[in-house]
Image (cartoon, grey):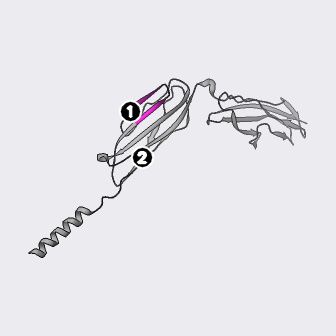
Amino acid sequence: MRKLTALIILIVAAISCKKEPAVEVTASFTTNKDVFQVGEEILIENTSTVKNNILAFCQWEYGDLSGTEKAYGLDLEGVSFSQPGLYTITLTAYAEQGAGQDTYSHQVLVIDENDIPWADFSCPAQARVGEEVVFEDRSVDNIGGIKSWRWNIGGTESVIDSPVIVFDTPSTGVPVTLTVTDAYGASDTVTKTIDIIE
């Protein structure tokens, strides 16, 4: 009987000493882009994970230095900002029964329509076959400046600010398209035409 009692005590002790697996909470979310217009809804997807437990609760904070809003729930919908600025969205994710938590923050830039880059360039209305034609970028951006250029000049691609092209055949109404992108990913496109003569 003593042996049986000792065996039961050993089993109970072994079970009670068994370590629970570690709970790992990783808070994360994505936004559909990083640059938004004033009043535009920010689409947010909660991508948080919890290892060895379940995601039970989320706290969201969003705003700037002038004030912060709070919301609670696994998802956050209907967020938009009425003033231009750089805003921080913070998520704190919690595992069930206080087993762990983690925090993640992401910034979004909110601009008004005057802060979008304005694509523009100059080129002659007409050029001769075999002569160099300069396509001069004249784009403007108020926040951060123009960071990239994408040209399509009658099918010829270029990514420099002011390319020089030589046409080898005459053509009327050759389309020239320039797309510029600023430091925050906002872009604008303009298209003009040029005639190539003998």
Indicate the position of residue 20 as horizontal and vertical percent values: 30, 58
How many marks the image carries: the answer is 2
**Image mark for residue 150:** none
Q: Is residue 66 magenta?
A: yes
* Residue at image mark 2: 48
The vertical placement of 96 against 186, above or below, is below
Quadrant holding the C terminus: top right
At horizontal 76% and vertical 35% (from top left) the residue drawn is 176
Per the picture, the main secondary structure of the magenta-coloured stretch is strand
The vertical placement of 41 against 46, above or below, is above
Quadrant holding the N terminus: bottom left
The secondary structure type at the circle numbered 2 is loop
With 87 as the anchor, is 150 left or right in this view? right
The vertical placement of 183 against 142, above or below, is below
* Magenta range: 60-69
With 17 as the anchor, is 106 left or right in this view? right
* Residue at image mark 1: 71
The secondary structure type at the circle numbered 1 is strand
